[in-house]
Image (cartoon, rainbow, N blue to C red):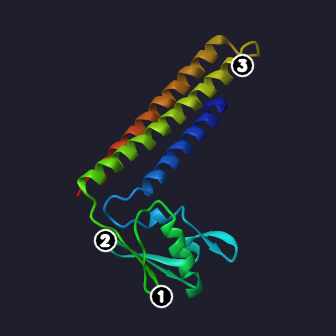
């Protein structure tokens, strides 16, 4: 692959990876500890991921259990969960926090699918913006030691790359939508 294309492919891969990580935070009826990935706890004045201050486990399909290594941080974890977008009230028994996930309603599932599609669309826009940047950079090569045919070939290659990534995003949207709609 041409070195000039490689940098744009890397950017597209990062966009796809970001979409996958966003999808992992959308819950689909089952308790998924990844919904806590973006939550930070104030740990001795420093924002720290929950996984670094507590043991996070899934003892049942619809429950996450968070057991901090230091009992003093229990309140901070509870506060982080309450101020997050998870939408679940934590149960604190003084030793650990439990998050019990209610069964998703049909309406909530449809809302989640809309959210999945919106995130997918945003990723497609990002991919197209990367393609536009690539084409612009190839056009700037005109006048240098490069033929117009080579520039045209680079533009065709970046279009093929874009098409393949859009296809991957569509597949990811379909997979996540099915997962969310499965009862």
Q: Residues within 10 Å of mark 1 (few under 14, many from 20)?
A: few
Q: Earlier in the sequence, mark 3 or mark 2?
A: 2
Left or right for 172, reference 182: right
Asked if 99 appears above or below 156 in the picture, the reply is below
Asked if 30 appears above or below 69 in the picture, the reply is above
The residue identified by callout 3 is 140
Q: Quadrant of residue 146?
A: top right
Q: Residues within 10 Å of mark 2 (few under 14, many from 20)?
A: few
Left or right for 139, reference 18: right
Label placed on residue 94: 1
Asked if 31 appears above or below 125 in the picture, the reply is below
Label placed on residue 61: 2
Secondary structure, mark 1, is loop
Q: Position of residue 118 (x, y in %)?
A: 42, 41
Q: Position of residue 182 (x, y in %)?
A: 24, 55
Label placed on residue 54: none
In the rendered view of the protein, which quadrant contains the N terminus? top right
Q: Residues within 10 Å of mark 3 (few under 14, many from 20)?
A: few
Q: Quadrant of residue 71?
A: bottom right
In the rendered view of the protein, which quadrant contains the C terminus? bottom left
Secondary structure, mark 3, is loop
Q: Mark 1 and mark 2: span between their CA atoms?
A: 23 Å
Left or right for 105, reference 153: left
Q: Do tag 3 and tag 1 residues touch (Cβ < 8 Å)?
A: no
Q: Earlier in the sequence, mark 1 or mark 2?
A: 2
Asked if 4 appears above or below 174 in the picture, the reply is above
Residue pictured at 54% horizontal, 79% vertical: 75
Badge nearest the viewer, 1 or 2: 1
Number of disc labels: 3
Q: Position of residue 139 (x, y in %)?
A: 67, 17
């Amino acid at each position: 692959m041409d070195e000039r294309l490689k940098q744009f492919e890397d950017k597209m891969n990062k966009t796809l990876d970001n979409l996958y990580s966003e999808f992992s935070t959308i819950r689909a009826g089952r308790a998924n500890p990844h919904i806590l990935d973006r939550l930070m706890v104030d740990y001795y004045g420093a924002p720290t991921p929950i996984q670094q201050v507590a043991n996070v486990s899934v003892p049942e399909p619809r429950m996450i259990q968070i057991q901090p290594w230091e009992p003093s941080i229990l309140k901070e974890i509870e506060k982080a969960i309450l101020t997050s977008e998870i939408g679940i009230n934590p149960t604190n028994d003084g030793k650990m926090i439990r998050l019990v996930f209610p069964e998703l309603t049909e309406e909530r599932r449809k809302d989640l699918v809309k959210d999945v599609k919106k995130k997918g669309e945003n990723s497609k826009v990002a991919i197209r913006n990367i393609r536009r940047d690539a084409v612009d950079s190839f056009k700037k090569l005109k006048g240098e030691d490069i033929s117009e045919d080579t520039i045209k070939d680079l533009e065709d290659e970046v279009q093929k790359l874009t098409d393949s990534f859009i296809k991957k995003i569509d597949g990811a949207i379909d997979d996540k939508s099915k997962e969310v709609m499965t009862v």
